[in-house]
């Protein structure tokens, strides 16, 4: 199984890793993508930190790749899913940053509306 994980924060990555712990195996591949604008050093830092969590938390999985992209998050996640032939896209329900709403965020809504493959939306615990 090929999973595409979309994340923007350590909290989102951790929640998604909790989801994958019970599902992904040594035979699976996980590609973790974070999208952040190059003109925002804070967003770039947060994205790199979010990406660093996945290989540690998913060490028992066959392959874990990470990638930092620039652009519109939903479009980049959908493009990445197509490029790797993802069987499933796994994203957080909303941003995993303090102050994020509990509603489904705009990126999750757009991915759900436009994905050509299954999408799992993982709840992000209260911060």
Image: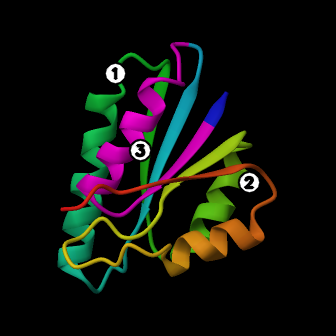
As drawn, which residue projects farthest toward the right? Answer: 116
At mark 2, the secondary structure is: helix
Rendering coords of residue 104 (x, y %): 50, 73
**Quadrant assignment, res 1:** top right
94 to the left or right of 116: left
Residue at (49% x, 18% y) in the render = 62
Residue at (34% x, 21% y) in the render = 59
Q: CA distance from mark 2 to mark 3?
A: 20 Å
Q: CA distance from mark 1 to mark 3?
A: 14 Å
Rendering coords of residue 112 (x, y %): 68, 66
Q: Which residues are magenta?
A: 3-26
Using the image as rendered, state which of residue 77 and residue 93 is in the foreground.
93
Q: Earlier in the sequence, mark 2 or mark 3?
A: 3
Using the image as rendered, state which of residue 84 and residue 111 is in the foreground.
111
Q: Which residue is mark 2?
A: 82
Q: Which residue is mark 3?
A: 16
Relative vertical location of residue 64 with respect to residue 98 in this rendering, above or below = above
Is residue 33 magenta-colored? Answer: no
Rendering coords of residue 88 (x, y %): 67, 43
Is residue 19 magenta-colored? Answer: yes
Q: Earlier in the sequence, mark 2 or mark 1?
A: 1
Relative vertical location of residue 2 with respect to residue 62 in this rendering, above or below = below
Q: Which mark is residue 59?
A: 1
């Amino acid at each position: 199984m090929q999973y595409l994980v979309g994340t923007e924060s350590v909290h989102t990555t951790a929640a998604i890793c909790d989801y994958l712990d019970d599902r992904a195996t040594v035979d699976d591949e996980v590609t973790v993508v974070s999208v952040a604008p190059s003109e925002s050093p804070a967003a770039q830092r947060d994205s790199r930190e979010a990406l660093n969590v996945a290989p540690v938390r998913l060490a028992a999985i066959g392959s874990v790749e990470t990638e930092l992209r620039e652009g519109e998050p939903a479009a980049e996640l959908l493009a990445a899913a197509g490029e790797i032939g993802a069987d499933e896209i796994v994203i957080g329900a909303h941003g995993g940053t303090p102050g994020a709403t509990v509603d489904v965020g705009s990126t999750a809504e757009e991915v759900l509306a436009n994905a050509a493959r299954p999408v799992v939306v993982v709840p992000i615990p209260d911060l």
